[in-house]
């Protein structure tokens, strides 16, 4: 059994003064001693069993937040990790720039209806953090408004935890050089060109600003109850394995249980 203690080096402590630039974008070689096909099969079987228990029990919920720069692998994680579990009770939700209607409401308004219910696992591909990250980089938020939004997020996530929803937040940590390779691969592949947007290249020019903003935001919103974890993302297979193990460890810490059967064994006989 993998416990959350294993991931302590990648866990951001509350109000941490860590430097994102000092965190490796690749997983250390000795992190996974059993990286063969049999071990991977066992890992994903465990994940599937835990998700089935979550769905059947309907006493807890899980929100997985995925954040990261363009090409960090948010889509890839969803495609590769969650293909191994039943789609029942699992939902992925992507967030883009807010619509005109969403702008007329508070910044968390569009998040509420997308949250998991009891028995559900929901994956956020980007999230409510977009409304503090991008405005910071673009200079759209004044400092007092930013601090209030960060406080609202901390309180919002604390409320979710109080309601039985575990919040697992993962920053997919990719290097600038690896992003260049992946953007070029998308430019060269007609099957991937649809993913490209002008903002991908505009944001790359602001890489240093984004790194500084991510560093400050992650430190300000990583709490004991809903911490941030940094996921090394330069290697896709390492990234997926790392996140799958973290997800399993998180769900095991939730102490999920199957519901008691409504029928007593022997109550009915098959004819």
Image (tube, helix red, strand yellow):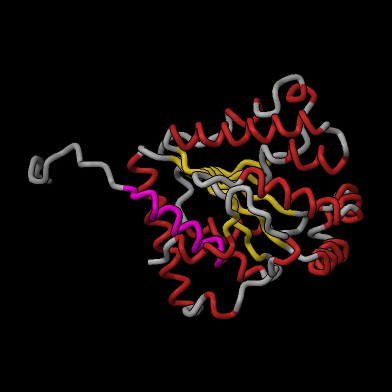
Establish if 146 lies above or below 257: above
Image point (63%, 30%), residue name:
152
Q: Nearer the viewer, residue 137 or 119?
A: 137
Q: Main secondary structure of the magenta part?
A: helix
Q: In which quadrant of the rendered view does residue 109 lie? A: top right
Nearer-the-camera pick, 193 or 136: 136
Q: Position of residue 212 (x, y in %)?
A: 79, 52
Res 89 quadrant in image? top left
For the point 62% across and 72% down, which residue is it?
A: 27
Can you see residue 271? no
Task: Check the image and report above or below for 263 versus 185.
Answer: above
Q: Residue at x 87, y 51 (%)?
A: 203
Q: Quadrant of residue 142?
A: top right
| Residue range of the region highlighted in magenta in the rendering | 242-256
Q: Position of residue 239 (x, y in %)?
A: 62, 66
Is residue 24 rendered to the left or right of residue 31?
A: right
Q: Would you say residue 52 sits in the magenta stretch?
A: no
Kindly tell me whether residue 159 is visible in this rendering: yes
- Asked whether, in this view, residue 170 is left or right of residue 133, the answer is left
| Figure quadrant of the N terminus | bottom left
For image coordinates 66% across by 41% down, the residue present is 127
User: Which percent across, then down, holds residue 62?
Assistant: 48, 44
Give how far across and how far down residue 154 sits, in percent.
59, 36
Q: Is residue 253 magenta?
A: yes
User: In the visual, does 136 lie left or right of 31?
Assistant: right
């Amino acid at each position: 059994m993998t416990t959350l203690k294993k991931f302590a080096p990648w866990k951001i402590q509350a109000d941490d003064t860590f430097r994102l630039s000092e965190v490796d974008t690749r997983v250390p070689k000795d992190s996974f001693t059993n990286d063969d096909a049999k071990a991977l099969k066992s890992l994903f079987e465990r994940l599937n069993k835990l998700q089935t228990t979550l769905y059947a029990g309907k006493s807890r919920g899980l929100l997985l937040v995925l954040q990261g720069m363009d090409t960090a692998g948010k889509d890839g994680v969803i495609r590769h990790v969650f293909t191994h579990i039943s789609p029942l009770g699992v939902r992925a939700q992507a967030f883009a720039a807010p619509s005109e209607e969403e702008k007329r409401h508070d910044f968390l308004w569009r998040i509420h209806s997308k949250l998991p219910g009891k028995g559900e696992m929901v994956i956020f591909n980007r999230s409510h953090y977009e409304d503090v990250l991008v405005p910071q980089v673009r200079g759209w938020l004044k400092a007092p408004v930013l601090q209030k939004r960060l406080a609202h997020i901390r309180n919002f996530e604390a409320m979710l935890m109080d309601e039985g929803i575990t919040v697992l937040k993962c920053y997919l940590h990719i290097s600038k050089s690896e992003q260049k390779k992946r953007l070029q691969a998308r430019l060269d592949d007609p099957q991937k060109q649809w993913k490209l947007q002008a903002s991908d290249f505009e944001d790359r020019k602001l890489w240093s600003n984004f790194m500084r903003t991510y560093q400050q935001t992650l430190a300000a919103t990583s709490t004991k109850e809903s911490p941030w974890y940094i996921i090394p993302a330069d290697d896709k297979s390492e990234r997926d394995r790392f996140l799958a193990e973290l997800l399993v460890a998180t769900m095991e810490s939730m102490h999920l249980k199957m519901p008691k059967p409504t029928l007593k064994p022997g109550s009915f006989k098959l004819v």
